[in-house]
Amino acid sequence: MDVRFLANPYFVDELRSLDGRDPAVVDYVFKQETTGAFLSRFKELLAYLLPQYHQEGKSQLTVSVGCTGGKHRSVAVVEWLAKELDGPGYRLTVRHRDISLG
């Protein structure tokens, strides 16, 4: 899922060096009306798909979220999704591939 349509914290000087796990970055990303509307729909899609994959005997599903640098928006979105979808019946693994890149 490409989340480059969300405003980019990279262009805010005080947020640039932080990542999407920092509360200031999370606040910046989530204060946008677009973010809430998107996350509601994305979560609904995943909540629908997960049982479908399970019913078909699939033991794994990879969900990737990306943005320009992989440090701010995608990280904040993935952290939120992981909290929202964590529960009985699913084991989630979160990996932020680009978070340590400059």
Image: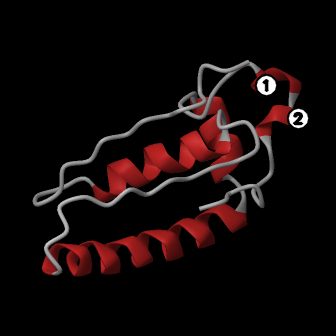
Residue drawn 75% across the image and 55% down it = 4
Q: Is residue 13 above or below residue 48?
A: above
Q: Is residue 79 above or below residue 14?
A: below
Horizontally, is 10 left or right of 48 in the view? right
Label 2 environment density (alpha carbons within 10 Å; few <14, some 14–19, many ≥20): few
Horizontally, is 49 left or right of 65 in the view? left
Mark 2 falls on what kind of element? Answer: helix
Between the residue at mark 1 and the residue at mark 2, the CA separation in whole angstroms equals 7 Å
For disc 2, the marked residue is 11
Q: Tell me where residue 38 appears, x and y as whole percent.
A: 60, 70
**Front position in the image: 70 or 10:** 70
Report if the CB atoms under discs 1 and 2 are less than 8 Å apart. Answer: yes
Res. 16 mark: 1
Residue type at the position of mark 2: Phe
Residue drawn 76% across the image and 26% down it = 15
- Count numbered badges in the picture: 2
Q: Tell me where residue 65 appears, x and y as whole percent.
A: 56, 53
Mark 1 falls on what kind of element? Answer: helix
Residue type at the position of mark 1: Arg
Q: Tell me where residue 41 appears, x and y as whole percent.
A: 52, 76
Q: Is residue 1 above or below residue 72?
A: below
Q: Is residue 29 above or below residue 6?
A: above
Q: Earlier in the sequence, mark 1 or mark 2?
A: 2
Residue drawn 50% across the image and 71% down it = 42
